[in-house]
Image (tube, grey):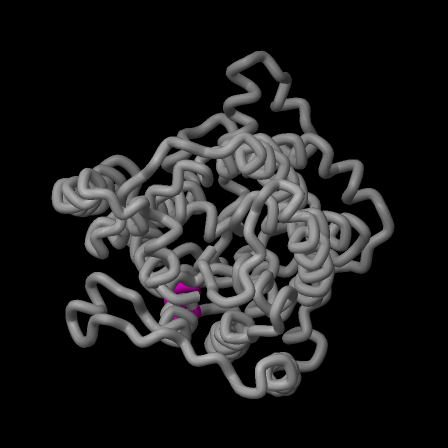
Amino acid sequence: MSGSAVASRLSVGNRAGLDINGPTSLLAAAGIVGGAAVLGALINPRQAALYVLGAVLGLVLYHAAFGFTSAWRVFIADRRGEGLRAQMVMLAVASALFFPVLASGSLFGQPVAGLVSPAGISVVFGAFIFGIGMQLGGGCASGTLYTVGGGSTRMLITLAAFIAGSAIGAAHLHWWAALPSLPRISVIELWGPWTALAVQLAVFALIAGVTIVLEKRRHGRLIDAPASPRQGLPRFLRGPWPLVAGAVALALLNFATLYLAGRPWGITSAFALWGSKIAALIGFDVASWPYWSAPARQAELNGSVFNDVTSVMDFGIIAGALLASALAGRFAPTWKVPLRSALAAIVGGLLLGYGARLAYGCNIGAYFSGIASGSLHGWVWLVAAFFGNVIGTKIRPLFDLEVERVRLTGC
C-alpha cells in the first residue's frame, strides 16, 4: 500500500486543492494542540494524551497508506501479498510486546487487560459481513477514519452508514449473543505467554510464507514497492513511508494505547455510541436496549463523547490524517461521487457497522488487538472476514468499483 498510490485516490491533484494545503496543515496542527489542551483542562491529561496518540495513529496510517481492505483485495484478485506480510509483521511485533505484559496484568504499574471476547455464530457472521462491507464501503474501520481525514468525501458516506449500522448492531446484539458460542478463550491463559507467543509467531510466518509462494507462482517474483520520491526528513514529514515502517509504528502505538487506556486500541465501539446518541435524539428508546444496560455503558450513553476513550482517539485519527494529507500536499476533496459508488458506500458502511458489533470489534479491535491479546475470537474473525472479502471483491464490479491488479491503493 504505497503512499504514492493513496495520493492519487485521496486527491484530485487540481491547483485549488494544492493551494489549501498550507492553511489546512496549520488548522489541523492547531486542532491537535488545541484539542489536547482543552481535553487536558476539562477531562484529564490522560484523555489529552490519548487524543494526541490518536492523531499520531492517523498520521502513520496516512503516510504509510496502511489499510487492510486493499491489501486483502489485491491478494485475492492477483496474489500480491505485500500488504498481508506487513500485517503479519505488525501482529508479530504487537504480540511480542503484549503477551508478557498481559500475563503479568500490569504495565509500568498501570493495570492492563487484553481484548478477549467469545467466539461463536455472532463473530463468524459479523466478521463475514464486515469483510463484504470492507470491499463495498471502500475501507475498514481505521481506513474509513484516515481517508475521511485525508479528504475522501466518498468515505464520509461510508462513515455515516458505518455509524448507523453500528447503532442497529448494538440494538440487536443481545439476540446474536444468545446464539451458540465458545467462551472467552485466551491462548496466553491457556498455554502461558511464551508458548502462546511461539505458536502465534509460527502462524504469522506461515501466512507470510504462503503469500510469498503464491505471489511468486503468479508473477515469477515478488512485486517491488515503487521507489519513494523523497528521503530523510522530507519523507518522514510528507511520506510515503515504507509499509513495514508503518506496521512497526502501529504495533508500538497500540502498545502505548494499552498503557494509557488500560486496554488495546479499538475504534468501532465509539461508532455505536455516536449512532445510539443520534437515535436517542430522534426519539428511539435507546436506554432500553440491553447493550446499554450495564452501569458503565449507561454512563457512556448519558455522558459526553469526550469522556469516551475510543471516541477521543477516533477524533484524533481524523485530525492526524488531515495533518498528514496537508503536509503531503494531497488534501483536495472533490464532492462528485457516482451514484452506484455512493450506493456501495451506504451498503458497505451498514455491513461494516452491523458486523463490527456482532463480531465484538473490527479489523482493529477484533483482528489486530484481539490477536495481539491472544484471543481466539481474533483468529476466528480473521478467517471469517477474509472469506467475506473474497465475496466483496467479486461483487465490486457490480458497483463500478475497481479491483486492483497492478497496484495497491491504501485503504
Magenta stretch bounds: 251-255
Q: Quadrant of the N terminus?
A: bottom left
Decide if residue 294 is in sight here. no
Q: Is residue 114 above or below residue 327?
A: below
Question: Residue 193 location, x and y as percent?
Answer: 60, 81
Which residue is rendered at x = 23% and y = 40% of the image?
Answer: 35
Front position in the image: 21 or 256: 21
Decide if residue 290 is in sight here. yes
In the image, is residue 34 part of the stretch drawn in magenta?
A: no
Left or right position of 299 against 313: right
Question: Residue 200 location, x and y as percent?
Answer: 63, 80
Residue at the outermost right position: 180
Which quadrant holds residue 248?
A: bottom left
Left or right position of 215 against 14: right
Which residue is rendered at x = 76% and y = 49% of the image?
Answer: 125
Query: What secondary structure predominates along the stretch shown in magenta?
Result: helix
Which residue is rendered at x = 73% and y = 33% of the image?
Answer: 172
Which quadrant holds residue 345?
A: top right
Question: Residue 53 location, x and y as percent?
Answer: 32, 56
Total tally of numbered discs in the picture = 0
Front position in the image: 107 or 290: 290
Which residue is rendered at x = 50% and y = 67% of the image?
Answer: 406
Which quadrant holds residue 66?
A: bottom left
Q: Is residue 189 above or below residue 37?
A: below
Question: Residue 148 location, x and y as percent?
Answer: 39, 42
Q: Is residue 408 above or below residue 120?
A: below
Residue at the outermost top position: 283
Front position in the image: 213 or 23: 213
